[in-house]
Amino acid sequence: MKLRQVRDLSHTEKRPKRAELSALGEARFKLTILGIVFLIAYSLIAFRLIELGFYCVMGTKIDSYSSPFFQIKRANIIDVRGTTIATNLITASVFAKPKELLDIDEVAKKLPSVLTNLNSKEIRKKLDKRKDFVWLARNITPLQQMKILKLGLPGIDFFQEEKRMYPHGSIGAHIIGFTDVDNKGLAGIERFFNEQLLNSDTVVQLTIDMRIQTAVENEIFQAVKKFKANGGNSIVMDANTGEILAMATFPTYNPNLPSKIKKETLFDSNTLGVYDLGSIFKIFTAAIALDTKKITLEDGYDATNPIRIAGFTISDYLGGEKRWLSIPEIILYSSNIGSAKMAMDAGTQAQKSFFKRLGFFEKVPIELLELSTPILSQSWGDVATMTISYGYGLAVSPLHIVRGFAALVNGGYLVKPTLIKANISPIKTQVISETTSKDIRRLLHLVVQKGTSKKARIPGYFVGGKTGTAEKRNVGGKGFLKKANITSFLGAFPIHKPKYIIYVQLDDPKGVKETHGFRAAGWNAAPTASAIIKRIIPLLNILPEDENDPSIHKFLNINLSPKVFSSSAG
Amino acid sequence: MTRILSQFWMIAISLNLSLACALYHIKYKVIDLEHSHLALQKKYNILSESNHTLNAEYTFLSNPKRLATLAKKYLDKKYTNPVHLQHVSVVKLAHVLDLKSVSSNPIPRNQKVYSIRLASYQQPR
């Protein structure tokens, strides 16, 4: 029994041993797993701690590496050849934190040696201890910044800003315009394309060629000086596309110094000024009469006696030729009487409708906001028709006249003047016939060869044009100023295949020694136009032509003697 | 069964660890690349800014008004005039291209004298 008990005991003792062993193994295994889990967990925590430690260091490294992306706030403006006209440069502006300043007196004493436009008193006044932040100078030069840094003034710091720069200075200022200190466009292209320039990186490419613009501005400046004029302006435009190559006005301003711009220099005579342009209108009158087929170049009018109508007397300059004049002669001698009769034959309605087609009653559609509306004659009757025929009674801007003139010579198509280079074909509207356009070109060539615009002649080149000498409008009063003139020249070259239009205007030029005391356009505006053409021809790659070329002569030849004299007015 | 389970756990843990290591490596690789990118970006920014400033400086220094003033001051040069322009057909090219007549110095014996033949050109109309 005892033995059995022992056996039983031995049996029961053996069994738990095996279970114990397996339980031990299981426990070991679980412990290992747990250990590994804990190891992973603690390793992760350790890694994370190391990582955080490193990350902070690396984070600072990233910060030290990172710099504000070079992103200019305002896009560039370039000319037709890609030359930069307007660009933004990173500049520093200096500010102070008066509360952090250790010694205001030291700052007030030292800073004026660098910021020369401020004196100690002004600086001390600005550094009011109650203020947290105060600007001391905006957009300083790198040299000034370096000098201020060398002064080592605590509480004086710099803020990175952008400044609009115009590397060509005053050249093309009226077209480009300028911006304020906050990069907001205030005039010209800068104003018209303000949103686009601010919100897009795309540069604005102009049709202006800065080489031509410089040449034109230089010649206008020389002419103003030479003829003692109050001012002058000029436009060079592509006759077929309406692209403006140069548009200059003097006096001008420097857009780099907006605070120093005088109000009167902001006035752009080409787009804002409206003028009675005188005899230049005679070529438009001839175009109306020819295009309405009321006359041909073979016709003529009696210009022997002045026209007396409604208390007005229309006479020719210095008495005129006092005889019958053919249509070419009317233009050649710039006869007011002949023009008035021609306009009357064409009719008031035809004149109105023609000028409307040329866009003379509204603002010129161009990428500028500084535009003027023409001044029309209040009552457009017979008298107005006659006076408008030779350039009094309809005041338009030079840009209007250039646009209209392009249509007269380019085959009869009205183009939209533009300052923006767009590689698309221009929209053209036919306003006169090709035949009329040819006749007009012949008349214009005649005027330069034999008429009032002889001084615009250039050997080797065929230039056509018409001068205009008009009395200035009495601003604020009635009528015109007898002793102050607006002289102008409106031409095209080469006249047999017009490519470019040139307009030159001088405001109140005086009679000088070289002009023998004369102040008519033929003595000042025409030679100025010639000087401009001479300067720009090499830039436009126009080669001289054979002046005796029979085909050109045949095209431009015109018969001066009238065959038939028929006129209702004459 | 226990052995299979334990082997499975071992494999899973090893995989997990390898993955963690790989991720760790990739993460730091990415951080390194980010640093390189930022460093390059910074260099690019500096170069762009310099290029931008140099372009403005070049435009200022080469503006036609300034060049004309300098040419007048130092070179006694005047503007090109239409009289300086001629069509190639009008210019006496034979004279211009005659090397002997151009050079006043005698040509050394060993120097070759190239004969220049002009392409035919059309008379402009």
Image (cartoon, rainbow, N blue to C red):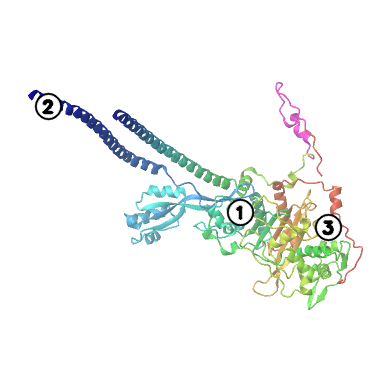
From what the image shows, is residue B111 above or below residue A529? above
Pointer 1 local density, CA inside 10 Å: few below 14, some 14–19, many at least 20: many
Marks 1 and 3, the one that precedes in the sequence: 1
Measured Cα–Cα span from mark 2 to mark 1: 119 Å
Disc 3 target residue:
A435
Query: Disc 1 vs disc 3: which is toward the camera?
Result: 3
| Numbered mark located on residue A9 in the image | 2
Disc 1 target residue:
A171
Question: Please, which chain is the residue tagged with disc 3 on?
Answer: A
Give the residue displayed 77% in from the left and 57% down from the top: A409
Question: Please, which chain is the residue tagged with disc 2 on?
Answer: A
Direction bottom: furthest residue: A311
Please provide the residue range marked out in magenta.
Answer: B90-117
Give the residue displayed 77% in from the left and 71% down from the top: A387
Residue A460, magenta (yes or no): no
Callout 2–callout 3 Cβ contact below 8 Å:
no
Direction top: furthest residue: B110
Direction right: furthest residue: A563
Residue A210 spot, x, y in % from top left = 63, 50
Say left or right for A28 vs A202.
left
Residue A455 spot, x, y in % from top left = 77, 56
Residue B112, magenta (yes or no): yes
Say left or right for A51 vs A568.
left
